[in-house]
Amino acid sequence: EVQLVQSGAEVKKPGESLKISCKGSGYSFTSYWIGWVRQMPGKGLEWMGIIYPDDSDTRYSPSFQGHVTISADKSITTAYLQWSSLKASDTAMYYCARHGSCSGGSCHNWFDPWGQGTLVTVSS
Amino acid sequence: SYELTQPPSVSVSPGQTASITCSADKLGDKYACWYQQKPGQSPVLVIYDDTKRPSGIPERFSGSNSGNTATLTISGTQAMDEADYYCQAWDSSTLYVFGTGTKVTVL
């Protein structure tokens, strides 16, 4: 079974750093991009960025470029999303999701499955 | 930037058909997919590549995409289909874009 298991909920203060994780299992971790998606309280889904774990090729949404860092450690089949200085506006649920397959330069540009989500709360 | 617009809400009676639209310039030239998100749960892919259903998704879910509009149709809607639905597409400049989301209420 393909699974993405995310790290647990976090409560942080503004200005603190944070790194959350997403561990993949049940498939070839290095063969699929992994994406990160934000959902603020009561709001919709926002694509943040995506990483190819085999070579750590990363793309960011312009809305999140410079605000977060996406990385991966293929030796432990885990992707990460990190902040160096959190703000109250970073309070949200964060999901990782496996991208559809790619071959011959063509990709299926959807996400399935999704992790269970990591709730990040930033409050003084 | 590329934007996908959905109606905020759709209401449907049990057993009837619900149609959820997703609109953007020349959306029909791209592939659209749809996610279902129930309260407190992660999104689930219900339609990909405009019309295809992943394994395990009931046949009552179907999709289409033409012109400027993609549509998710739920035939014979059940109470368990009450959820938020999001369309998503890929654009060469914006990359991955999600729609604004539609809350489906089964009355």
Image (tube, coloured by chain):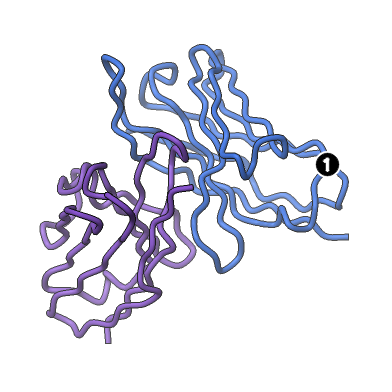
Please state if A115 lies on the left or on the right of A86 as rendered: left
Q: Nearer the viewer, residue B80 or A40?
A: A40
Report which residue position mark 1 lands on: A85
Please state if A72 lies on the left or on the right of B33 as rendered: right
Q: Position of residue A116 (x, y in %)?
A: 49, 48
**The N terminus of chain A, quarter of image:** top left
Q: Amino acid at mark 1?
A: Ser
**The C terminus of chain A, quarter of image:** bottom right
Q: Position of residue A42 (x, y in %)?
A: 56, 69
Please state if A10 lies on the left or on the right of B94 as rendered: right
Q: Nearer the viewer, residue B57 or A91?
A: A91
Q: Position of residue B93 (x, y in %)?
A: 45, 36
Q: Position of residue B98 (x, y in %)?
A: 42, 52
Q: Residue at x 12, y 69 (%)?
A: B75
Q: Chain of mark 1?
A: A
Q: How many marks?
A: 1
Please tell me in which quadrant of the rendered image residue B103 appears. bottom left
Q: Dot 1: few (<14), some (14–19), or many (≥20) neighbours within 10 Å? A: some
Q: Secondary structure at mark 1?
A: loop
Residue B39 position (above or below residue A52): below
Q: Residue at x 52, y 12 (%)?
A: A55
Residue A42 position (above or below residue B107): above
Task: Specify the farthest residue to the front.
Answer: B25
Q: Residue at x 32, y 53 (%)?
A: B25
Q: Residue at x 22, y 61 (%)?
A: B72
The colour applied to the residues of chain A in this rendering is blue
Which chain appears purple?
A: B
Residue B8 position (above or below residue B95): below
Residue B66 position (above or below residue B102): above
